[in-house]
Image (spheres, rainbow, N blue to C red):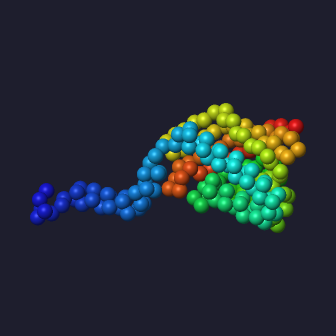
Amino acid sequence: MSPTQPMNRRQSLALLLASATLAAAPPAAADNRRRALNEADIVAAQREWEAGLLDIARTRETHGPEAARARAARMIDRLCAYAWGPVLFKPTLAGGTQTFRTTRAGALAYFAGGDANFPDDTGFALKPWRSVRIRNIGLQIRHDTAMVMSRAVLTDADGRVTEVDKTWGYRRGPEGVRIVLHHSSLARVE
């Protein structure tokens, strides 16, 4: 096609679609969404969750519950996909009418307590945790989505061990890898 020839309908549509695609997302975000997840991405996200939980526990001990709540909020925002919509979160020790936490507020109440709308929550992350280690049992990856079954072993300041079975769902989006599913159930307490 020369510069003086008009575009046909198909060429016009192709140009319109290409322009819309480029305008819809900045190049870095578009590249990030197209990149498939891999096991290293999942392990890195899990290590960040482990470190976040320990950081919240230490912050409570050194700076009090409000500072720990702020840390928990940052961890949730960094690791969970609540900004994208509901996260399917079933906490380890939640039950009754407040078993499921599909909102950020529900997740924050579970991890840090202090929310009158969730009166049974005392803050799972506020316990005096000293170590956390996640051991993956099985992993399935389908491009930008992964499902993982694992066992988390948590040890507190008195040496008591709590083992928790987990099912995680991860998805890669414009901001990175985020948790979209987190089901947790108590396996064993020593």
- Classify residue 58 as left or right of residue 13: right
Above-or-below relation of 84 to 41: below
Provide residue 6's location: percent of width, then percent of height: 15, 63
Q: Could you tell whether 138 is left or right of 6 in the image? A: right
Can I make out residue 185 in this image? no
Asked if residue 164 is positioned above or below residue 96 in the image, the reply reads: above
Which of 101/114 is in front?
Answer: 114
Residue for point 82% across, 63% down: 64
Dividing the image into 4 quarters, which one contains the C terminus? top right
Residue shown at the point (44%, 48%) measured from the top left: 34
* Tally of numbered discs: 0
Q: Is residue 2 visible?
A: yes
Q: Residue visible at 78% across and 66% down?
A: 66
Residue 61, x across and y down, in percent: 82, 58
Residue nearest the viewer, comparing 19 with 128? 128
Give the image location of residue 137, x and y in percent: 67, 33
Which one is in front, 101 or 31? 31
Residue closest to the far top = 137
Q: Residue furthest front?
A: 62
Quarter of the view holding residue 150: top right
- What residue sits 50% from the left and 56% below the top? 174
